[in-house]
Image (cartoon, helix red, strand yellow):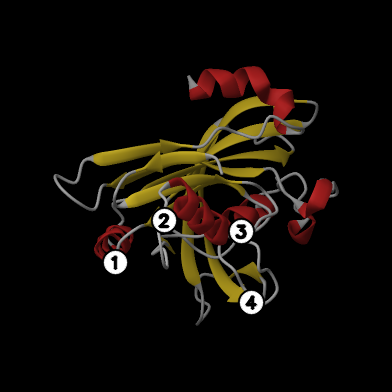
Amino acid sequence: MEILLLDNHLLAANKPAGLVTQPSGAHADSLESRAKAWLKQELAKEGNVFLEAVHRIDRPVSGVVLFARTSKALARLNASQRDKDCTKTYLAIVTGEPARPDGRLTDTLVHDPHRARIVPADHADGKRAMLDYRVLATASGRSLLRINLLTGRYHQIRVQLAHAGWPIVGDTAYGSRERLPDGTIALHHWELRVPHPVGDHDICRIVAPVPPVAPWSAFALRLAALEN
């Protein structure tokens, strides 16, 4: 467990790519089950451990996942998300180079089984999806992007970047021609800012280091400068 934050109300961990956030019928091993076992051992807790994910990230994605350690914290964190008081920043390595160094992508998405797709704006089931991006570096036909997520739609970053012509490296489900080990993709939830659920509601800034492996290692110097 790579623990990023721990107090009486919160636990944040850096999820490895390839691991699901919560257990399911198909995946018994999960970040949540590992975190519960870690808490039970580290804090010598007896009985069941309360721990609920405040948000999830896709199995092939790495980065920050925040858990509530009490029902009170969970309710307040869920309210913060509904009120859009949380800021989520991702890093992605994509194929291609955007013509502009930064910009905003606005699309309308629908959620099909296990994937999302972009539809016309007047689609009856469509939901608006928005993100801001900035190009941090380019190398060998790839670009490192910093992404501020403005809405939280299913597979939003993956489908919007692919639609723009810049599929995420490894994301064969959305057009990438490259496959990474274990079906992972070059998308990382790098930073989460969220009001602490108890006390004076100070803003917690939680940062997850990027995996020191390919394809991220090609941008190691730029990533080191970002994290410092």
Number of the label disc, if any, that sits on residue 71: 1
Number of the label disc, if any, that sits on residue 67: 2
Q: Are marks 4 and 2 in contact (CB under 8 Å)?
A: no
Number of the label disc, if any, that sits on residue 190: none
Number of the label disc, if any, that sits on residue 58: 3
Circle 1 SS class: helix
Q: CA distance from mark 4 to mark 3?
A: 15 Å
Direction from residue 30 to residue 43 in the image, left or right: left
Where 34 falls versus 5 (above or below)?
A: below
Q: CA distance from mark 1 to mark 3?
A: 24 Å
Specify the amino acid type for callout 2: Phe
Q: Earlier in the sequence, mark 1 or mark 3?
A: 3
Circle 4 SS class: strand
Residue with the mark numbered 4:
112
Q: CA distance from mark 3 to mark 2?
A: 16 Å
* Quadrant, the N terminus: top right
Where 142 falls versus 76 (above or below)?
A: above
Residue 35 point in image, percent of width and height: 51, 54
Q: Earlier in the sequence, mark 4 or mark 3?
A: 3
User: How busy is the neighbourhood of tag 1: few (under 14 within 10 Å), some, or many (20 plus)?
Assistant: few
Name the mark nearer the viewer: 3 or 2.
2
Specify the amino acid type for callout 3: Asp
Name the mark nearer the viewer: 1 or 4.
1
Q: How many marks?
A: 4
